[in-house]
Image: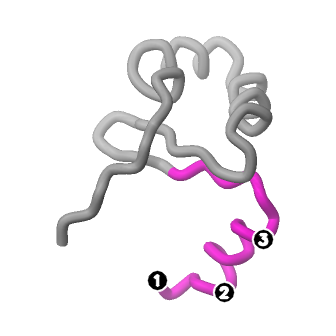
Amino acid sequence: MNRASPLIANENRGFYFLQTMKKDPLNFFVSLAEKSGPYAWIRMPGRNVLFLNDAGGIKHVLQTNHEN
């Protein structure tokens, strides 16, 4: 299956991301939620991670669509 890669902002990947997150992880995620809204893609080493900051989205992932 060929899926398109999600758009990942420059500040959410690479050295800048790791440096900022390591310095102050709480502030990093609060800032990410303020800038990106209910969801944001983050590039972790070897994978892309979806950061959810919306109760409806979290419920969908963990409860409604948990078998997927």
Instruction: Kindly identify which residue carries mark 1.
Output: 68
Image spot of residue 8 (x, y percent): 45, 37
Instruction: Kindly identify which residue carries mark 3.
Output: 56
Tell which circle, 3 or 1, labels the residue nearer the N-terminal end: 3
27 in relation to 57, above or below: above
Mark number, residue 33: none
Q: Does residue 56 appear left or right of residue 4 in this picture?
A: right
Q: Looking at this view, is 13 or 24 the one in front?
A: 13
Mark 3 or 2, closer to the camera: 3
- Quadrant hosting residue 1: bottom left
In the rendered structure, which amino acid carries the disc numbered 2? Answer: Thr
In the rendered structure, which amino acid carries the disc numbered 1? Answer: Asn
Residue 4 forms part of the magenta stretch = no
Q: Residue at x 64, y 12 (%)?
A: 23
Tell which circle, 3 or 2, labels the residue nearer the N-terminal end: 3
Mark 3 or 1, closer to the camera: 3
Write the start and end of the magenta stretch as one range: 50-68
Quick one: label 2, few (<14), some, or many (20+) residues within 10 Å?
A: few
Q: Which secondary structure, mark 3?
A: helix
Mark number, residue 64: 2
Image spot of residue 47 (x, y percent): 34, 45
Residue 64 forms part of the magenta stretch = yes
* Cα–Cα span, label 3 and label 2: 10 Å
Image spot of residue 12 (x, y percent): 51, 28
Q: Which secondary structure, mark 2?
A: helix
Q: Which secondary structure, mark 1?
A: loop
- Quadrant hosting residue 30: top right
Q: Residue at x 66, y 86 (%)?
A: 64
* Cα–Cα span, label 3 and label 1: 17 Å
Q: Residue at x 49, y 20 (%)?
A: 18
